[in-house]
Structures are given as C-alpha cells and as structure tokens.
Image (cartoon, helix red, strand yellow):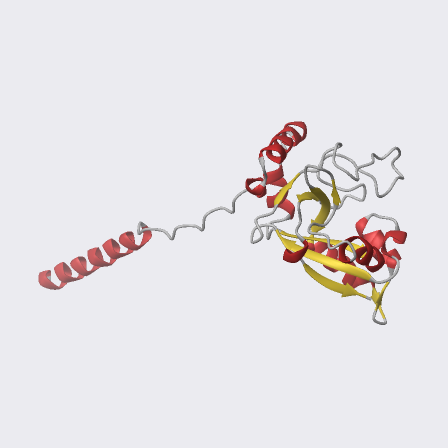
Amino acid sequence: MTHFFRSALLCSLLVVIGCKTAETGTQPTPPPAAPSVTEACNDQQKAISQEADKLASPYSIDQHVEKNFQDRQVSWLMPDALYQKYVVQTGAKNFGRCNDAACYLFAAPTKVIQDAVARSMVDGKHDPAVIGSALGLPAKNFEGPLKLMTLNLATTKTCARLPVDADPGVWKCTSPEDKDCFKFGGYTSGNIPEIMVINATVDQATVADIP
C-alpha cells in the first residue's frame, strides 16, 4: 500500500508540475501595433498634426484612428460628373483640393460610407436623400451617378491627420442647423468620423460606380 500511495503521489506531483509549466509557459507574442498614420507625413504635415493634437488634447489622431479607422480604410463619394471633370480630364495625380504644399481630402471610415450607400439603394439606384441623411450632409451633394473611392492608408503609406481650420475646403459652421461645414475635432457637422488625407494618390485608390 505504501508503494501504491507513493506512486500515486509522484504521479500527482508530475501532473501539478506539468500544469504549472503550461500555465507559466511563454505566451504568444502579440502582433506589433500598426504605425501611426502620421509616419508617412512630411515635416510640415507632422507639425500641423502635432498642433492639431494639442488643440484636441487629450484626444489625438492616434486615438481617433484606433477608435474609428482601425482597418486604416478610408472612403469618400464624388459625383461622377465632377470626377470626370477634375480627375479624368485633368489627369490628376491626387484627389482633393490642392495648393503648393499638398492636396487635401476629407475622408470617412469605409464601412460608414458603404453602409450609407447600401441603405440608399432602391431598384438599382441610390437615393441621395438617404445618403445625405446617413452622412449628415445635404442630399444635393449626392445627386446623379457617383464614384466611391477607397484607400488603405497603411498599405499605401499615405499621410493623414486631424483636419484643421486652415485646410483648403474648410468653412466653419455658423449655426447648429448648418450642414457640410467644418467643426474641429475629427467629426463632421453630422457627427460622422472624418480624417484629413494628404496626397491621396489616384492610382492607389479603388473606384466603384454607384448608379
């Protein structure tokens, strides 16, 4: 009996030791955090981003991206007529409003745009009022055939930051009822997350037709 209990005790110790080893074994290394979207920015844009982060403190572009753009996918809509006029006919290299320093483009999370478009489709065509309501923008912005552009900030190594008052295309809201106007903080007047993309290249974006 003594030999039996000694053997049983030894087996129990081996089991406990084995479990302890498994519990304290090396844990899988978590994947490295994605780099900040400002890493692709030049010194000028990084400086603007740092100032924007100070104004938004304790919020920041990195927190904004983590909260709203985790997959680094951004999208925007454009009437086909304007796409043909300003992108195709001019042979534009970048989307957005440009000055001597860069081209500036407001973009939203891809899923937000795609969901708005999907909800708007009736009999194979989009309803401008539904998209406008979903995005907090005037329906007239989405009349006629549209182009839906999508860009992956990470894979294309594209600079992005919080929008600021001095960006081209910015005009401030003057009343709570105003739409399609700018308020600082990373959200549109319709409370949709937005980000300022710098030099969003035409040849790196995917383009879809929205009838």
Q: Residue at x 45, y 51 (%)?
A: 31
Q: Residue furthest front?
A: 90
Q: Residue at x 65, y 57 (%)?
A: 203
Choose between 209 and 180: the one closer to the eye.
209
Quadrant of the snapshot with the N terminus: bottom left
Establish if 151 lies above or below 43.
Answer: below
Total numbered badges shown on the rendered structure: 0
Quadrant of the snapshot with the C terminus: bottom right
Choose between 28 and 147: the one closer to the eye.
147
Q: Residue at x 72, y 34 (%)?
A: 164
Image position, residue 106 (x, y; %): 73, 45
Choose between 68 and 38: the one closer to the eye.
38
Image position, residue 169 (x, y; %): 79, 40
Q: Residue at x 23, y 54 (%)?
A: 17
Image position, residue 100 (x, y; %): 71, 37
Q: Is residue 177 left or right of residue 159?
A: right
Establish if 125 lies above or below 89.
Answer: below
Establish if 109 lies above or below 177.
Answer: below
Image position, residue 167 (x, y; %): 74, 36
Q: Residue furthest left?
A: 3
